[in-house]
Image (cartoon, coloured by chain):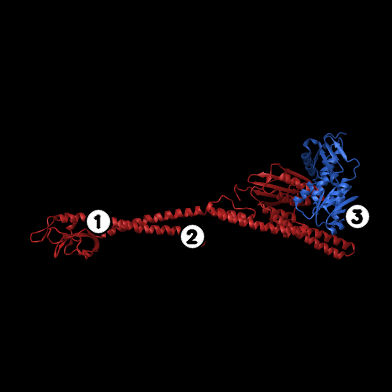
Chain colours: A red, B blue
C-alpha cells in the first residue's frame, strides 16, 4: 500500500480518530473516577468531622475539650495518613497521628460549610483535606475543624484505575481499528469491482460498467461509461474512415491494374511489371488494414452468440462457389444447437478466414467440428493438406500479427484468425490433423455469469 | 457468348469489356443499376459481371430482381468490399461467384469461362431420379420440388451416380471421376462427401451396397 492508497488513508484516519477518542475517553474517565473517589473520601471525612464536632465543647474558661476522640485507630498511629485537627486562635487540638506536625491552615477566611482541598501535609505527605469553621458556644470563639487523609491512596487508586483503563481502551482501540479495517474493506469492495470491470473495459471497448453498483458510486460508473461510449464512438469513427478509405482505394487500384494491362499490351512490359508489383503491395496493405479494422471492431460482448452450423454452411456456400473450394469436400460435424460466443457477423468473418485457409491448403477434404465441452465451446477446422510450415507455426505461436503476413496474403488467413480469436477471448491451438494436414482449434472458455 | 458488364468506373469497365472481347465474349456495358436491371430483363446473356457499388440501384438489388424475374444467367459479382458477410449476402442473393477488387484479369476470365461452361453443354438439362431432379444447366437440384444447395463437387457426384442406373459405384471410381487421378485418402474424402449429401438429401436417397459402393435410390437400370 503506497502513501497514495485510499485504503491506507482511510485506515490511518480511522486508527488515529479512534486513538484520539480513546485517549480523550481515558482522560475523562480517569478524571471522573478521581472525582468520584474524592466525593467518597469527602463523605468519609465529613462523617469523621461531624463526630469530632459532636464531641467538641469549650470549658467555662474557653478552652477546647473533646469529650471522646474518634475511635479510628489510624488517628492514634503517627503518620498513619488519617488526621484531625481543631484550631481556635492559638489553641489547637490534634490527633495523635499528627505527632508534632500540624495540618496547614486555610489561606481564605473562615468558611461556614465543609470545603475540600489538596495541600502539602505533615510528614511530607500530600493530603486531601476537609475543613470548616464551627462555633461550639454561641458567644464562643470560632473553631476550625480539619480532617485530612493522605492523598497517596487516592493517587494510587487513580493510577491503578488509569492503568487498567488504558489496557482496556488499548484493546478497544485494536478492536475498533480492526472493525474500521473491515469497514474500509467492505466500503472499497465496490471499487475493486469497478477496477475489474475497468480492466474488462480496457480489453473490450464495447464493454460497459454494470449498473449493479452502490448508489454512491453510480455517478462515477455513469461518467466512466459515458467516457467509454465517447471513446468507442471516436474509435469506430476512425476505423470506419480507415475502412472507407481502404475500400475507396480498391476501385482506383482496379483501374490502375487496367492501365497496367494497357501498358503491357502497348509493349511497356517493365512499366507494367512495376505497376503490378506496386498494385499488389498496395492491395495487400489495404487488405491488411481492412482486416485490422474488422478485427478491431470485433469483441466478445456479453450475450453474444451465433449458431455455428448456420454460419459454417453460409461460409462453405461461398467457398464452394469459388474455384478454390469447388473441388473440396467439406465434412461438417456441428450439431444445430451449438452456439459460439460471438456475434454472427464476426463468426462469419472468423470462419471465412479459417475455412478459406483450410480450403486453400487442403488436398481434397476439410473437416469442421464445433461442440460444447464442460466449461468451454470449441471449434476445429482441419484439412488433409501438407500441414503448416513449422516456421509459420512458430511465428503464429510467437504472436505473428497481420503486418507480418507474407507477400500475396500468405499467412494472412491464419493471422486474421489468430487476431479474431484473441479479440473474442478464444485460445488458438495448431496441431497435426487426423486427416494429415493442419488442425486449427479454437477454444472459448465459458464466461462466469455476470462477467462483463 | 454474350456477357453483360455492369461497372460504373469507366477505366475498369473498358478494361473488362476489352478483356472479355479478347476472350471471345460479346460484351455489353451498363454503367448504373437501373440500366443493368433493364438490360438483364430484356436481353439474353450467357454471363453477367456485376459490380455491387453502383449508382441509382445497388448491385445486390439488381441481382435479386433478376433472380426474382427468373433470369438465371450466371452472375460473377465484383466488389470493393471483401468482408465475408458481404460475400455470404452476395451468394445468398443468387450470385454464382464472387471476386474482390482489385482482381487479376486472367482470374476473372478463367472464372467467367468456368461459369459459362458449367451452365452450358447439356442438351437435356433436367434429369429425374425418383424424388430428385438435377438441373444440369444451372447445376442445381430439387428434392420433391424444394431447391437444394449443392456445391459443384456435390452436384458432380450426384450427376455421376445418376448416370449409373442400377449400378453401385465404388468410392474409388467416384474419386477418379471427380478428381481425375485417384490418390490415397480419396476414398475417405468420398465417404465424407456422401455423408454430406445424405445430410442434405436424406439418408435413404443414397444407398450403400456393402462391398460394392453407392447408388441413388430409385435409379433402376
- Chain where mark 2 sits: A
The secondary element bearing badge 3 is classed as helix
Give the residue at mark 3. Answer: B21
> x, y (%) of residue B210?
80, 36
Can you say whether A192 is above or below B197 in the image? Answer: below
The secondary element bearing badge 2 is classed as helix
Please state which of residues A87 and A100 is positioned toward the viewer in this rendering: A87
Q: How many marks?
A: 3
Q: Are marks 3 and 2 on the same chain?
A: no
What residue appears at the point 8 percent right and 59 percent down from the top-left corner? A60
- Chain where mark 3 sits: B
Find the distance from the CA under tag 1 to the CA under tag 3.
128 Å
Task: Looking at the image, tell me whether mark 1 or mark 2 is earlier in sequence order.
Answer: 2
Instruction: Using residue A167 as the reference point, say whether residue A42 is left or right of it.
Output: left
The secondary element bearing badge 1 is classed as helix
Give the residue at mark 1. Answer: A41
- The label on residue B129 is none
Find the distance from the CA under tag 1 to the CA under tag 2.
47 Å
Can you say whether A295 is above or below A121 in the image? Answer: above
Give the residue at mark 2. Answer: A9
> x, y (%) of residue A325?
80, 49
Find the distance from the CA under tag 3 to the CA under tag 2.
82 Å
> x, y (%) of residue B198?
78, 39
Q: Residues within 10 Å of mark 1 (few under 14, many from 20)?
A: some
> x, y (%) of residue A452?
61, 51
Please state which of residues A107 and B199 is positioned toward the viewer in this rendering: A107
Q: Are marks 3 and 2 in contact (CB under 8 Å)?
A: no
Quadrant in the picture for residue A389: bottom right
- Chain where mark 1 sits: A
Amino acid at each position: 500500500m503506497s502513501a497514495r492508497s485510499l485504503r491506507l488513508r482511510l485506515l490511518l484516519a480511522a486508527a488515529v480518530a479512534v486513538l484520539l477518542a480513546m485517549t480523550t475517553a481515558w482522560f475523562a474517565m480517569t478524571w471522573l473516577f478521581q472525582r468520584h473517589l474524592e466525593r467518597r473520601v469527602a463523605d468519609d471525612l465529613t462523617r469523621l468531622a461531624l463526630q469530632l464536632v459532636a464531641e467538641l465543647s469549650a470549658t467555662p474558661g474557653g478552652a477546647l475539650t473533646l469529650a471522646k476522640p474518634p475511635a479510628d485507630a489510624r488517628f492514634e498511629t503517627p503518620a498513619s495518613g488519617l488526621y484531625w485537627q481543631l484550631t481556635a486562635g492559638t489553641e489547637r487540638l490534634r490527633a495523635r497521628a499528627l505527632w508534632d506536625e500540624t495540618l496547614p491552615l486555610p489561606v481564605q477566611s473562615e468558611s461556614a460549610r465543609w470545603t475540600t482541598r489538596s495541600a502539602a501535609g505533615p510528614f511530607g505527605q500530600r493530603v486531601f483535606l476537609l475543613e470548616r469553621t464551627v462555633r461550639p458556644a454561641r458567644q464562643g470563639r470560632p473553631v476550625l475543624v480539619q480532617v485530612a487523609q493522605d492523598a497517596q491512596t487516592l493517587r494510587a487508586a487513580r493510577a491503578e484505575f488509569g492503568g487498567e483503563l488504558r489496557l482496556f481502551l488499548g484493546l478497544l482501540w485494536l478492536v475498533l481499528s480492526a472493525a474500521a479495517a473491515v469497514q474500509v474493506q467492505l466500503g472499497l469492495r465496490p471499487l475493486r469491482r469497478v477496477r475489474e470491470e475497468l480492466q474488462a473495459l480496457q480489453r473490450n471497448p464495447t464493454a460497459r460498467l454494470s449498473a449493479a453498483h452502490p448508489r454512491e458510486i453510480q455517478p462515477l460508473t455513469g461518467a466512466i461509461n459515458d467516457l467509454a461510449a465517447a471513446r468507442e464512438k471516436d474509435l469506430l469513427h476512425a476505423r470506419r474512415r480507415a475502412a472507407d478509405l481502404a475500400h475507396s482505394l480498391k476501385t482506383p487500384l482496379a483501374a490502375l491494374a487496367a492501365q497496367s494491362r494497357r501498358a503491357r499490351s502497348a509493349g511497356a512490359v517493365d512499366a507494367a511489371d512495376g505497376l503490378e508489383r506496386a498494385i499488389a503491395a498496395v492491395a495487400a496493405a489495404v487488405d491488411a488494414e481492412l482486416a485490422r479494422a474488422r478485427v478491431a471492431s470485433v469483441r466478445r460482448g456479453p450475450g453474444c452468440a451465433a449458431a455455428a452450423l448456420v454460419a459454417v454452411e453460409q461460409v462453405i456456400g461461398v467457398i464452394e462457389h469459388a474455384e478454390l473450394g469447388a473441388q473440396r469436400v467439406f465434412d461438417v460435424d456441428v450439431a444445430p444447437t451449438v452456439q459460439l460466443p460471438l456475434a454472427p457477423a464476426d463468426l462469419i468473418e472468423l470462419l471465412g478466414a479459417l475455412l478459406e485457409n483450410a480450403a486453400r491448403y487442403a488436398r481434397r477434404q476439410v473437416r469442421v467440428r464445433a461442440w460444447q465441452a464442460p466449461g468451454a465451446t470449441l471449434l476445429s477446422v482441419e484439412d488433409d493438406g501438407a500441414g503448416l510450415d513449422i516456421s509459420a507455426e512458430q511465428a503464429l505461436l510467437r504472436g505473428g500479427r497481420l503486418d507480418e503476413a507474407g507477400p500475396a496474403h500468405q499467412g494472412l488467413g491464419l493471422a486474421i484468425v489468430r487476431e479474431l480469436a484473441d479479440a473474442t477471448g478464444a485460445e488458438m491451438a495448431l496441431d497435426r490433423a487426423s486427416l494429415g494436414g493442419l488442425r486449427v482449434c479454437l477454444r472459448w472458455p465459458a464466461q462466469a455469469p455476470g462477467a462483463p | 457468348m454474350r456477357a453483360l458488364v455492369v461497372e460504373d468506373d469507366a477505366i475498369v469497365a473498358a478494361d473488362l469489356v476489352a478483356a472479355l472481347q479478347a476472350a471471345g465474349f460479346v460484351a455489353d456495358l451498363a454503367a448504373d443499376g437501373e440500366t443493368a436491371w433493364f438490360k438483364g430483363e430484356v436481353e439474353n446473356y450467357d454471363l453477367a459481371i456485376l459490380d455491387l457499388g453502383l449508382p441509382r440501384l445497388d448491385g445486390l438489388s439488381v441481382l435479386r430482381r433478376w433472380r426474382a424475374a427468373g433470369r438465371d444467367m450466371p452472375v460473377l459479382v465484383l466488389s470493393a468490399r471483401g468482408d465475408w458477410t458481404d460475400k455470404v449476402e452476395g451468394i445468398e442473393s443468387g450470385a454464382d461467384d464472387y471476386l474482390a477488387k482489385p482482381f487479376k484479369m486472367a482470374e476473372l476470365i478463367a472464372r467467367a469461362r468456368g461459369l459459362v461452361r458449367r451452365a452450358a453443354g447439356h442438351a437435356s438439362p433436367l434429369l429425374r431420379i425418383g424424388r430428385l431432379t438435377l438441373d444440369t444447366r444451372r447445376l442445381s437440384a430439387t428434392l420433391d420440388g424444394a431447391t437444394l444447395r449443392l456445391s459443384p463437387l456435390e452436384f458432380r457426384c450426384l450427376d455421376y451416380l445418376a448416370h449409373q442406373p442400377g449400378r453401385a459405384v465404388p468410392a474409388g471410381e467416384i474419386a477418379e471421376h471427380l478428381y481425375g487421378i485417384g490418390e490415397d485418402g480419396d476414398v475417405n474424402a468420398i465417404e465424407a462427401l456422401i455423408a454430406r449429401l445424405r445430410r442434405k438429401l436424406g439418408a435413404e436417397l443414397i444407398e450403400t451396397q456393402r462391398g460394392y459402393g453407392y447408388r441413388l435410390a430409385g435409379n433402376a437400370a
